[in-house]
Image: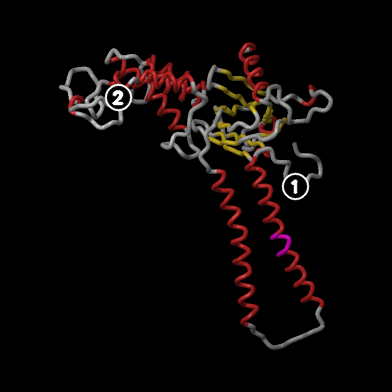
Amino acid sequence: MVTSVSRHPLRLCSPSDVRTQREGLQRNICGKDIQQLKMPDHIDEKLKNYRTAPFDARFPNTNQTRNCFQNYLDFHRCNKALSAKDQDTAPCMWYQRVYKSLCPMSWVQKWDEQVEAGSFPGKI
Amino acid sequence: MAHPLQLGFQDAASPVMEELLHFHDHALMVVFLISTLVLYIILAMISTKLTNKFILDSQEIEIIWTVLPAVILILIALPSLRILYLMDEINDPHLTIKAVGHQWYWSYEYTDYEDLGFDTYMIPTQDLAPGQFRLLEADHRMVVPVESPLRVLVTAEDVLHSWAVPRLGVKMDAVPGRLNQTAFIMFRPGIFYGQCSEICGANHSFMPIVVEAVPLEHFETWSSLMLEGA
């Protein structure tokens, strides 16, 4: 008998979660659509409480250049990926807030111009 | 700021600087003790009436003057490493400020919420008001909230500079194309001065740093005014 279970994304998969693949949908490990994880609400909460870029364990040292660049890349990649699937790009705003906090305005301006001109060196 | 004939450090305005200050006192005390002992021994050697033509040996004193220096070194190393790891602790800042070095001025950017950026130039000596400090005053100050963990990302637009504020125990090189992170908490309000600490051309001595720590409400008022004025 299948009892009702919470919709927490980390719960174990039940047989009713397994779905057939459909084109254009992102899957988590239980075969759920991303929308069912209620991503936009989490993001709204996080963006509302945003103070500054939090500690990122990938960049624990003094040199934060890569932290800034990585978030800039992640923002554009996120936008590109979600737009391609016609999904809401609100989750990408997190990356934008972080790179705006970390990156000097002149760097962002230069990169934005390069992105528009198609000469940005990073892979988006 | 430093005052004439000053011997020690300026008063600390951040916890790390306070630790550094105490450690310096501790290490300097050890240095004074050793120097005094050595000076005393030298004087005693010079002024003694005793003479001895034979080489003596003594196991006891050999042991003492091997073990005692090792113990002293450990007593210096332990607080030193403690401070080193304290400075490296992961902190969760409340505010990020970018300090960008140019020839020959600093610019500060507060971009967590809105895009606030401004340049700060030294006030020339002939334009100083009475009571202001020569070569240290700037037309804009980097205003920060007191008792908030801060992250400052230091970089440069042209050549090497270095962002230093002695009272905070901060010195971080500004390298073009690189973002160097430093973090501190200011535990007292006030105005703290620093100077560019990496040779950067003709006016290297004339690009000071002024940090002003104020209560949070005043910081919010100041940032709103700066945004309106921009």
Q: Residue at x 71, y 65 (%)?
A: B34
Name the quadrant containing residue B146.
Answer: top right
In the rendered image, the residue lying farthest to the top is: B228
Inspect the image, locate mark 2, and give the three-letter code of the amino acid beneath it. Arg
Query: What label sits on residue B148 in the rendered view?
Result: none
Mark 2 is surrounded, within 10 Å at the Cα level, by few (under 14), some (14 to 19) or many (20 or more) other residues, namely few
Quadrant holding the C terminus of chain B:
top right
Inspect the image, locate mark 1, and give the three-letter code of the amino acid beneath it. Gly
- Mark 2: which secondary structure? loop
Q: Is residue B57 visible?
A: yes
**Of B185 and B179, which appears nearest the observer?**
B185
- Mark 1: which secondary structure? loop
How far is disc 2 from disc 1 in space, using C-alphas?
62 Å
> In the rendered image of this protein, does residue A13 appear above or below residue A83?
below
Q: Is residue B35 left or right of residue A120?
A: right
Q: Is residue B91 magenta?
A: no
Q: Residue at x 60, y 72 (%)?
A: B66
**Of A41 and B134, which appears nearest the observer?**
A41
Q: Which residue is mark 1?
A: B8
In the rendered image, the residue lying farthest to the left is: A20
Mainly helix, strand or loop, the magenta region? helix
Q: Is residue B207 visible?
A: no
Counting every numbered tag in the picture gives 2
Q: Residue at x 27, y 15 (%)?
A: A85
**Are the residues tagged 2 and 1 within 8 Å (C-beta)?**
no
The stretch of residues the image draws in magenta is B30-34
Q: Is residue A119 left or right of residue B195?
A: left
